[in-house]
Amino acid sequence: MTYSADTTTATGVERSVHAAVWQGSAIPGDTKANLQTVSRAVRAAADQGVELVLFPELFLSGYDNTAEELGALALHQSSEELQEVCRLARDTGTCIALPYAERDSRGALFNACALFDASGRLALNYRKVNLWGPWEQATFARGTPEHLRGAPLALRSGLTVRCGVIICYDVEFPEPARCLARQGVELLLVPTALGAGDVEAVTPFKVLVCEVTWRVAAQVLVRGVTWRVAAQVLPTRALENHLFVLYANLEGAARCVAEQNVPSFCGRSCLLAPDGEEILRGGGHIGGGLLSAVLRLSAYAASVKRNPYLADCDARLADGHYSTVYPPPSPPSNPSALPAPAHSALPAGPDVAESERTRVAAAFLTGLHGRDFPYGALHEAQRLRLYLPEEADRRLSTAGRLPVAFLVHGGFWKSKWGSENTQSASLVPDFLCRGFAVALVEYRRREMPGGGWPGTEQDVMDALGFLRELEVRGEPLDLERVVVIGHSAGGQLALVTCGRAWASPDGRAAQGDCASSSPAHAVRPCLCVAIAATPDMMQAHEAGLSDEGDAVERYMGCLPDSATNREKYAAASAQQYLPLRGPTLLVSGTEDTDVPPALLADFHALALRAAAEAARGERGPGDPLPPPVELLSVLGADHYQLVTAGSRAWRHVARRTTQMLQEHCGWLLAPQPADYSVTRERGFLPERDPPLSILEPSSDGGVANIPPSSSTTAHPESHLPVLSAVEADCFARWEACVARLPGLLCIGQQVRAYLAKELPNIEAGAPGALRPWQLCLLANEGLAERAFAVLAFLTHGWVWGEEPIVSRLPRKLAVPLAAVADIVGRPPILTYFSFNAANWQRVDMARGVELGNTQRALNFLGGRDEEWFSAVHVAIEAQAGEALLAVVRLQRILAADGPPAAATPEEGATPARTVAALQEGAMQLVRNELRIVGGSLAAMTATLRRMKEHCDPYIYYMRVRLFMSGWTHEALPHGMEYERVPSCARDAGKDMPQIAEHHWRRERYFGETGAQSSVLPALDAALGIAMSEDDLSPYLKAMRDYMPPHHAEFMRAIEHGPSVRKLLLSVVAREVYQSAVAVQTVAAYNECIDGLTLFRGIHFELAYAFVRKFDERKDDEIRGTGGTPFMPYLKKHRVNTADMKLVYSEEPSRQASIDADAQ
C-alpha cells in the first residue's frame, strides 16, 4: 500500500526530492526474507518515481532479537547482503537507507544504517551514538561523534542533497540533529523502532517475561506515552534546525510480546517539513507500505527567515554568550565507579581521533601482500616491508626492474606510531598502481632500545642501503630510480638520509655523528620528497611540536640548553647537507597546525641561497646547474591530507612529483590521468556533473583507494568545516543574484544598483587563517568551480551589463572573487572553463555529455544562440576524452622498459630506443592509439561544423561576445581595480581597512577565449607540434595560467613524456627497416595532423563568420575576446600544423630541419 503527498508550492522552486519511508514489520532473524521485502518496496517505489527510501531501525535483521542472535546476524560493510542492496540501488536508480546490525573488523557490534546513492555507492554508514537502555548499551558499541557527519547523496535526477542519519533515541537529544544541521544537512533520516502503549499497558510482571519483552516494554515503561516522540519531538527537531525529517518506524507486535497481545511498535512514520508541519503521517498500522512525498527543498525560505534559529545560535556561540552558563561537562569525580561498556568502538587509547586514524590508515594495507626483511637486530622495529605491483601495473619496468618508492612514516618519532598505522600507509596502494615497488620502512622510535637520535636516523640510512642487499637477492629493484618520500618526522628523516646519501660517492655523510656505518655501496636516491617535514631541529623545538610540545627534545634526548646539545641539534638537522646534491621537493599545507609551514619555507630559502652561492663559487662554464629544490605549498591542506591517497592535496603532490621525475631525473614517464582529472568519457570536463548551486553538495565524495570496508571513512581531522549561518546566507545571496542576472541584463539598467544592494560583504582569510567558507570550497572542487563561475558571471555583468563601463570592482565582488580564484588556481576573471566546461547540466541523465543533451547552468542574456554556442564547446571537450586517454596509453607504450640506466635529464625525454628496437606488436599498439586520436579529432570537427545550426553569427557578435571580454578591452585602458584586495603578498591577511587604496590590486587580465581550452594544446604536445615563435607565442603560453592548473600540468607532463614524433622521424628518414606496420603508423600520425589542420581551418572560418565579418577594421587591428589580433594568428597556426606532417625523404636531415625551424 502506498500513501503519497506533494508539497508543491507557488514559489516555483525547482530543487525537489521524491522521498519515501517504509513502515511495516520485519521478520526477526530472517535476513533473506527482509531483503526480499526491501527489494519489492524499492522497486515499487522506483516505479512511482521515488528517489529515496528509508527503512526502520535494524530492519535487515529485525529489531526484536536477542543479543546472541544479533551477533550471529551482524554483517560487515562488504558483506554480500549489502552488496545486493548496492546493486538494487544502482539497478533502480534509487537511494536506499537500510539499517542493519554491523560487525566491524575488530568484532564490535553496532546499530548501524547504510545509505546508498542512486549509483549504488555507499555514501554514508552511520553508527548509533545514543544507545537506549541497558539492553542496547550492553549489546552494541557506541558510535563515535565522528559518525555524526552529513554526506552528499547523488539522486537519480542528477541533484545532490546533503543527508544525515541518526537512529531512534538519537533524535530525542537536541545535539545530534543540530550538529548535522550546522553542517548543511537538508534531509534528516531517522530510522526507529519506537514502542507503543503507556505506563498502564505493561506491568512489571510482563517486563520479566523474557529478554525481548523487557527491552520493548521497558521503552514504554520509562518513556510513558512513546508516540509523543513522533508527534511532538520530531516536529521540534525539524523546526529548530530547518530540516526535512524522514521518520520510519516498525509496526505490529514484537516476538515474545505477541503472546500477551501487547502491541510493541507504534508505527506513526512520517515526513516533516522544515517549518515543523506534517507532510504525511502514517497510522499505527498500515500493513506494510510506503509513505511518499515530493519534498520541495527550497520552498521554506520564509519559515527559515521568520525563525532564524541556526543563524542566531551560531551568532551567540561565536560571541561566547553561553560559555559561562553552558560549560563543557566535567569528568566524574570517581571514574572507576562508572560501568565499562560491553565493547569499545575504537582501540583503547587517550585520543579517539588518533585511534580512528590508526584504523583508517591500516585499512589501506588490507589485502596487499608485503614481505618483511629485517635490516637490523631488532626485527620488529628494524625492518623493511617490500610490496611489488601486479604484473599489469608494471609499466615502469626497465629490463624487468622496478623503480622504488622508499616510504618513511612520521608520528613525531613516537613508538606508538609505526609504518602500518600512520596516514602515509595510504600511499602504498597508490604507488603500486603507478608501477612502483614500495619499500615501507620501519625504524626504532623513541622509547625503544637504541631509538631516538642518532639511532633512528641511522636506521633509515641502513634501510636505504639494505635495498642493495635485496637487489643482490634477486628482487626486481632498479636502484638508479629510487624516490625517498617522508612525512612529518619521516620528512625530516628523508631529508637527512638523502643529504647523507648525496654527500659523497659512497653515501657516507661528511658531517654528523651518524657517518660511521653507511654501506660501502649506498643507494643514491634520484629524488627526495619531504612532506610537512621538520628540517631544522632547533626551529622545530621552538615550535613545540606534538600535543605535548616536547616531541623534538624527546627524540633528541636533551634540551638545547648547552653548546654541546645545540651541536647535536645541528647535527640532526638537514641544513648541514646544504647545498643539497639531488633534486628535492618540499611540500607543506597552508592549514597544517601540526608542523608550521614556515619550517619548510625557511629551509627552502636557505637551500636556494646555498645553491646560488655554490653555483657562483664552483660551477664552471660546462658544469650542470645545481639540482633543483622546489617548494610546493598546497592551499587549504592540513597535515594529513598531504599523504592521503586520492585527496586533492595528494594529487597536487603526485603531479609535482611526476614533473620533477620527468624534467630533472630523466625519467620516461607518462602522466597518470586521475592525477589531472582527465577521463575517457569527458576529457577535461568535470568527472561528475557540476553542481547547480554552491549550497548543493556535489558527489565528489570520499577518498580514493580506501578499501571497501572503509569506503565511507574519511580522515578524522579532514572533515568539512561547518559553515556559519552568515556564510551560508552569503552563498545563497550569490546564487539569488546570479539567477536574476539575465533578466537584469535584458533590461540593460539597474544591474549595479541591484547587485550593490543584494550582494553581501564577506571576509576572506589569508593562507594559514582561511575562513570556513574557503575551506569548504577547497574540500569540494565542484562547489569551488560553481562559486567561481557565479562570482565571475556577476563580475562581468557588473562591468559590461550597463553603461558606462566601469574599471573598479566593488568589495562585495572583488574580495570573494579573488579568494575563490586562489582556490581554483586561476585569475579572478571569467575563463573558458567557467564559461563553458564547468557550466552545464545534462537534460537526460540516462545519456552522456553530448551535443543536444546539455544546457547551460549560468547565462548572461541567455537564449538559443548562447546555449548552443556553449553546448558545442562542451560536446567537443567530451569527445576529446578518447584522444587524451589514447595519448597517455601511447606514451606508456613508448616508455615500456624505460630509458637506459645512465639516462640524464640533459638527454631530454626522447625515447632511447629506435623503431628497430621497438617490437612489432608494440608498434601496432602505437598505430592503433594514433588511429583513436584521429577518430576523436574527426568527431570533434564534425561537432564544430554544427556551430551555425542554432547560433547565429550576428546574434553571437551583438549579444554574447561582449560579456566574454576581459580587462585588456579598449574600454579599459588601465585594466580593472579590485577594491580591498591587496596588490602584494605582504598585505594579504591584513584587515581590509588597513589596506590603502593605492595598494589595491589592479590587473589587465585577458578575456574568455577558446585559446584557454586545454584540448588542442594537449594534442599538439602529444604529437610534437611546436608552433613557431611569434608575437602570439607569449600569449599562448600565458593562456595556460587561465586553465585549471591540473590541466596545464597535464599538458606539461605530455610535453615532457615520450615523443611519438621523434620515434617516427627515424622511419621517414629511412634510418630503419620500413615494415608495413611502421609505414601504417606514420600514416596514422599524419592523419592526426590532417585532423588538427582541418579543425583549425574550420575554426578560422567560424572566426571570420562570427567576428571578422562584422568589423570594418583591418585584421591586425581587430581584437578577440582574449585581446589579441586573432585572424593572422589563427591562419598561421593552421599552416604551421599542416607543415608538421611527416614526409619520406632520401635526405634524413630534411624533416629534422623542419622541426628545428618550428622550434
Image (cartoon, rainbow, N blue to C red):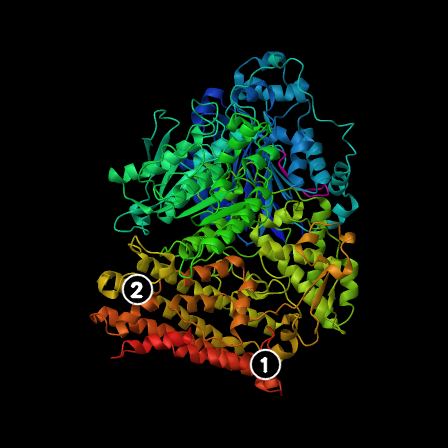
Quick check: is 697 in the magenta stretch? no
Total number of numbered discs in the rendering: 2
Q: In the rendered image, is residue 773 in sight?
A: yes
1040 to the left or right of 398 = right
Numbered badge on residue 926:
2
Q: Quadrant of the C terminus?
A: bottom left
Q: Is residue 1110 above or below residue 685?
A: below
* Residue 1038 picture quarter: bottom right
Secondary structure beneath dot 2 equals helix
Q: Alpha carbon of mark 1 to alpha carbon of mark 2: how far?
A: 40 Å
Numbered badge on residue 1107:
1
> Magenta segment range?
268-281
Amino acid of disc 1: Val
Picture residue at 61% right of the left edge, 83% below the top:
1117
* Residue 172 picture quarter: top right
Q: In the rendered image, is residue 154 in sight?
A: no
State the image coordinates of residue 973 (x, y, percent, origin top left). Answer: 70, 74
Q: Quick one: which residue is furthest to the front in this view?
A: 617
Towards the viewer: 512 or 937: 512
State the image coordinates of residue 977 (x, y, percent, origin top left). Answer: 72, 64
Foreground mark, 1 or 2?
2
Amino acid of disc 2: Val
* Residue 513 picture quarter: top left
Q: Residues within 10 Å of mark 2 (few under 14, many from 20)?
A: many
639 to the left or right of 450 = right
